[in-house]
Image: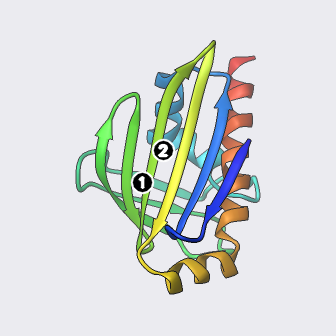
Amino acid sequence: MNDHIDRQKFTLNFERLLTASCEQVFAAWTHPEQIAKWWDPSGAPLVACTIDLRQDGAFRFQNAGHSPAFCGVYKVIEPPSRLEFEALGTYGTVSLQPEGNGTRMRVTIRCGSAEHFAMFLDLGVNENTSKTLDNLVEHMRSRAT
């Protein structure tokens, strides 16, 4: 696990090594039935998850009501190595690269301004995203057994 806050570039960076292929991890990011199992930082399943997996296609992930739905639009879809999306006024990138018997995943969330970035930090987006990505690591581990 490697998380980094870049205050100069208004960016949150996360890195994980997963015990699954890039194809399996990409599927975990793009199949609603999988996302529903790991997306919420609390570990609770989502109550709704819709995905229109195409450029400019929308997605919506809804938890049990402890925060607003996470909604956005896909900008780049390059299976099985890259997803880029806009959500909540940010630009997100998921990069997947094979490493050993697994996948090195890098996730970047870039805010457009210092004020927006400060608000994200105040809301705990960095901690919640870290927990969510740890959920994904565990999800992939449990699917391998």
Q: Position of residue 86 (x, y in %)?
A: 37, 63
- Residue 45 is situated, as x and y percent measured from the top left of the image, at 67, 52
* In the foreground, 94 or 46: 94
Position of residue 50 in the picture relative to residue 55 (left or right): right
Using a 10 Å C-alpha cutoff, classify the residue at mark 1 as few (fewer than 14 neighbours), some (14 to 19) or many (20 or more): some
Which quadrant of the view contains residue 127?
A: bottom right
Residue beneath the point at 23% across and 49% down:
55
Marks counted in the figure total 2
Q: Which residue does the image show at 75% across and 17% down from the upper left?
A: 145
> Which residue type carries mark 2?
Pro
Could you say where residue 24 lies in the image, as x and y percent from the top left?
52, 25
Residue type, label 1: Thr
Work out whether 144 lies above or below 117: above
Label 1 or label 2, whichever comes before in sequence order: 2
The picture quadrant where one finds residue 105 is: top right
Which residue is label 2 attached to? 32
Cβ–Cβ under 8 Å for marks 1 and 2? yes
Element carrying mark 1: strand
**Mark sitting on residue 50:** 1
